[in-house]
């Protein structure tokens, strides 16, 4: 059967998710066309990718890299732009069907809003956007008739478990967590851990920000908030379960007590492909899961005593308003500082908590409030380092 090709914009194509999404494109050249590629600094890889995939438009946000990228791509007829505003403008292009947001952190917020307002469906890897402004984003999606297809493996799992269950309410979800490199550690043992130790994730190869978030369990905290907005859930309906093998990607429990889970090897290409190909499951030759390779699948309680970030995230979600935005901005500052050896591992949560207490609460934030909150929190968090 001859199917229409999907034209995709990949924001953050040089990152971990970005490069894996291009592998998904490689597996299905008859189904996907790359319209837009973007990067922040990595001009070399962006140029290499552009020569291979020949997108219509390329954005390098760091303006000092513009000349180099434009010189390399001009003869190929590829339009090159730079600066943050360009990132927002390119998603509006009428050729684009799906925007894959693989930017890291708060930088994804404005381009995602612009994409939604232009009616583009979103394949969402950039969970921070939903954490910062989930209320605004979900309202805009309804208003513009836009769907969000989750790329985050846990949320993709839940999304897959819900296919065909539209009229059946969710009792609760089980959000699985690998536990990261510091699973089963107590606070005493984490007093002096280094970034090198924190960057060694047992199961996933990811960008540095999310790898630190996984070590501090903030990643799971952000995912709890992400799940609330994606699946319209209350605090009591979201349970974290530590599952070190990362094979059960998450599960949904329905009101009859039945639990449906999604399984697979830990490989982000699978959720990326599901988000881009939805509603179809596309054939591929990615590695296959075998139960016999995993004779023991184990499950543990999440450790809220060691990982204060978990309580902070649940509390931010419960309080709502601009508090999750504060949590996110403070977290971005402390993670960056931790990667530069400017703060200890455990102190990261203290700074975040402090910011959540001190920044002015806004109950029903608008976009400007989120922008102000993000800016104010970054200033305060930097002072608190
Ligand atoms: P990476 O750090 O590997 O990649 C980030 C990408 O965004 C790069 O292309 C980078 O460009 C670009 N970028 C970074 N900062 C900016 C900025 N300020 N403005 C414009 N572009 C920017 O991150 P990941 O791929 O690991 O993560 C991307 C998102 O996906 C995150 O939100 C993460 O939480 C989420 N996610 C990631 C998973 C993973 O397995 N990696 C799993 C689930 C979710 P450059 O290369 O030039 O710096
Ligand atoms: Mg995840």
Image: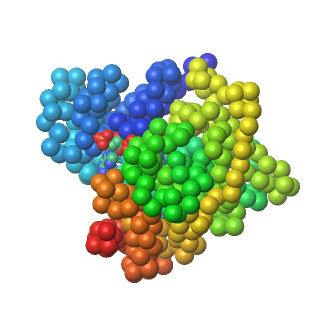
192 relative to 381, above or below: above
**Rendered image quadrant of residue 64:** top left
- Image spot of residue 51 (x, y percent): 28, 23
**Quadrant the N terminus occupies:** top right
43 relative to 383, above or below: above
- Image spot of residue 62 (x, y percent): 21, 45
**Rendered image quadrant of residue 58:** top left
Q: Is residue 338 visible?
A: yes
Residue drawn at point x = 56 percent, y = 56 percent = 185
- Image spot of residue 67 (x, y percent): 13, 36
Q: Is residue 149 visible?
A: no
Residue drawn at point x = 64 percent, y = 40 percent = 245
Horizontal side of residue 327 vs 273, given as left or right: left
Closer to us: 361 or 162? 361
Horizontal side of residue 370 vs 280, given as left or right: left
137 relative to 250, above or below: below
Horizontal side of residue 208 vs 314, given as left or right: left
- Image spot of residue 305 (x, y percent): 59, 66
Residue drawn at point x = 69 percent, y = 67 percent = 236
**Rendered image quadrant of residue 69:** top left
Q: How many marks?
A: 0
Closer to us: 101 or 375? 375
Q: Quadrant of ligand 1?
A: top left
Farthest right residue in view: 256
Residue drawn at point x = 39 percent, y = 30 percent = 34
**Quadrant the C terminus occupies:** bottom left
Closer to us: 113 or 319? 319
């Amino acid at each position: 059967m001859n199917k229409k090709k999907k034209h995709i914009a990949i924001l953050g194509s040089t990152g971990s998710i970005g490069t894996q999404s291009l592998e998904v494109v490689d597996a299905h050249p008859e189904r996907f066309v790359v319209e837009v590629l973007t990067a922040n600094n990595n001009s070399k890889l962006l140029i290499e990718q552009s020569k291979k995939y020949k997108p219509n438009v390329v954005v390098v946000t760091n303006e000092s890299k513009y000349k180099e990228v434009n010189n390399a791509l001009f003869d190929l007829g590829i339009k090159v732009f730079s600066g943050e505003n360009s990132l927002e403008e390119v998603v509006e292009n009428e050729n684009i069907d799906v925007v894959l947001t693989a930017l890291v952190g708060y930088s994804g917020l404005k381009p995602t809003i612009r994409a939604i307002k232009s009616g583009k469906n979103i394949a969402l890897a950039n969970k921070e956007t939903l954490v910062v402004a989930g209320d605004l984003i979900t309202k805009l999606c309804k208003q513009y008739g836009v769907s969000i297809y989750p790329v985050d493996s846990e949320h993709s799992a839940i999304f897959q478990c819900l296919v065909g269950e539209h009229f059946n309410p969710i009792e609760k979800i089980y959000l699985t967590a690998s536990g990261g490199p510091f699973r089963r550690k107590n606070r005493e043992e984490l007093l002096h851990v280094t970034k090198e130790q924190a960057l060694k994730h047992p199961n996933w190869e990811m960008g540095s920000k999310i790898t630190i978030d996984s070590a501090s369990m903030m990643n799971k905290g952000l995912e709890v908030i992400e799940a609330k907005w994606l699946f319209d859930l209350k605090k009591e309906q979201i349970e974290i379960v530590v599952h070190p093998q990362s094979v059960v990607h998450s599960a949904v429990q329905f009101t009859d007590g039945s639990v449906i889970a999604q399984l697979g090897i830990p490989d982000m290409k699978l959720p990326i492909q599901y988000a881009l190909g939805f509603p179809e499951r596309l054939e591929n030759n990615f590695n296959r899961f075998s139960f016999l390779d995993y004779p023991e699948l184990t499950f543990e309680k999440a450790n809220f005593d060691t990982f204060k970030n978990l309580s902070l995230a649940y509390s931010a979600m419960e309080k709502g308003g601009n508090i999750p935005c504060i949590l996110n901005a403070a977290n971005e500052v402390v993670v960056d500082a931790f990667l530069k050896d400017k703060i200890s591992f455990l102190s990261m949560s203290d700074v975040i908590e402090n910011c959540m207490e001190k920044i002015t609460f806004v109950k029903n934030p608008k976009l400007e409030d989120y922008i102000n909150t993000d800016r104010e929190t970054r200033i305060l968090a930097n002072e608190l380092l």
